[in-house]
């Protein structure tokens, strides 16, 4: 995992620990990243940012190392000043700073309630994450990067009424790291009734990628999509067969199956079925399932999948 360089269509600017307002760019021209170091007080750093930047003009915020651990209440308390906030990235940390499975999050409902104008929300990490939100009228993009997305959070996202949501990406992760979402918990999402504007769906990084492929093969939400991602997981020929025998996917502009365990023959069948229809099929990152190579780990846990298959991001 790497720090984001652009967010919400804006270049990311890390707020320096010491600066004057006259040295800063226009507040609406960048995504402001708060990233404290070991010798910087989070509270002083936050106070300096709120007193030197025109908060009313801020469109996007990225919370990184140190600043990520500041309570959500600090943001909520400033909602009357952050009136133009459209995008929020929580947990922009690299692996060297903290492994994705240990990045702590929280109940996101109060934040979403405090910022009804929010258009994009990105979250890295799933530890403690929940999304008990009945609805949000404005949210258009929701992305959760996780090595183990709590099943309750995934179920709440699937059930939420998000009428403006156009892009949804969920890294479901492994149950060894807090994941374990089932197809049944995603049923309201796959039914397509509560997110009528959805055009891109990513159900990724899952040890049950074959089951997800079978579910999407008949899911009512799929015909309205322009792109579908089942990448980063343990997709095998079983899942590929389900996609080929399910509803037509030729209306898609893009199908992302990267990081997979498909045979060369199955890759050719999928490419032959979809590429001539104009679908961009991403089959990069082919992996070999090898029980001998993984030794006793091969079937020991979902992290490595059945028969030596494994997801892209777990720990």
Image (cartoon, rainbow, N blue to C red):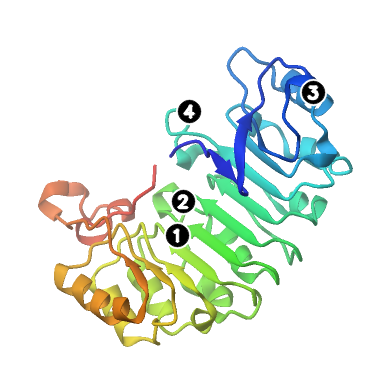
Name the residue beneath numbered marker 1: 180
Q: Which of 169 and 101 is in front in this view?
A: 169
Q: Distance between the residues labelled 3 and 1?
A: 40 Å
Image height check: is 22 above or below 218?
Answer: above
Label 4: which secondary element: loop
Name the residue beneath numbered marker 4: 97
The reply to whether discs 4 and 1 touch (Cβ–Cβ < 8 Å) is: no
For residue 27, which quarter of the picture? top right
> Depth-wise, is mark 4 or mark 1 nearer the camera?
4
Within 10 Å of disc 2 (Cα), the crowding (few <14, some 14-19, many 20+) is: many
> Depth-wise, is mark 3 or mark 1 nearer the camera?
3
Estimate the x, y position of residue 136 in percent, counting from the top left: 75, 63
| Of callouts 2 and 3, the N-terminal one | 3
Q: Which of 184 and 63 is in front in this view?
A: 63
Q: Is residue 314 left or right of residue 115?
A: left
Task: Please give the label number shown on residue 47.
Answer: 3
Estimate the x, y position of residue 92 in percent, counting from the top left: 55, 37
The reply to whether discs 2 and 3 touch (Cβ–Cβ < 8 Å) is: no
Examine the rendering and report whether any part of residue 104 can be seen.
Answer: no
Image quarter (top left, top right, bottom left or bottom right) of the C terminus: top left
| Of callouts 4 and 1, the N-terminal one | 4
């Amino acid at each position: 995992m790497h720090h984001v360089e652009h967010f919400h269509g804006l270049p990311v600017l890390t707020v320096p620990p010491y600066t004057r307002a006259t040295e800063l760019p226009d507040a609406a021209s960048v995504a402001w990243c708060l990233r404290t170091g070991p010798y910087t007080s989070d509270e002083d750093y936050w106070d300096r940012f709120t007193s030197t930047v025109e908060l009313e003009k801020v469109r996007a915020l990225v919370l990184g190392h140190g600043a990520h651990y500041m309570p959500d209440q600090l943001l909520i308390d400033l909602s009357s000043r952050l009136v133009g906030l459209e995008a929020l990235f929580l947990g922009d940390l690299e692996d060297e700073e903290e492994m994705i499975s240990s990045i702590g999050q929280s109940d996101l409902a109060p934040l979403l309630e405090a910022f009804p104008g929010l258009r994009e929300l990105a979250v890295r990490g799933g530890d403690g994450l929940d999304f008990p939100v009945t609805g949000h009228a404005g949210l258009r993009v929701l992305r959760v990067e996780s090595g183990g997305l709590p099943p309750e959070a995934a179920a709440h996202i699937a059930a939420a009424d998000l009428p403006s949501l156009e892009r949804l990406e969920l890294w479901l992760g492994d149950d060894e790291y807090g994941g374990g979402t089932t197809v049944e918990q995603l049923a309201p999402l796959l039914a397509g009734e509560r997110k009528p504007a959805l055009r891109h769906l990513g159900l990724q990084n899952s040890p049950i990628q074959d089951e997800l492929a079978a579910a999407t093969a008949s899911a009512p939400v799929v015909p309205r999509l322009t792109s579908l991602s089942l990448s980063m997981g343990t997709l095998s020929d079983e899942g590929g067969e389900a996609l080929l025998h399910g509803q037509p996917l030729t209306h898609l502009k893009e199908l992302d199956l990267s990081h997979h365990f498909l045979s060369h023959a199955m890759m050719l069948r999928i490419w032959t079925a979809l590429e001539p229809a104009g679908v961009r099929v991403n089959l990069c990152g082919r992996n070999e399932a090898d029980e001998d190579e993984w030794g006793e780990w091969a079937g020991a846990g979902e992290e490595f999948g059945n028969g030596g298959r494994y997801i892209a991001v777990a720990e």
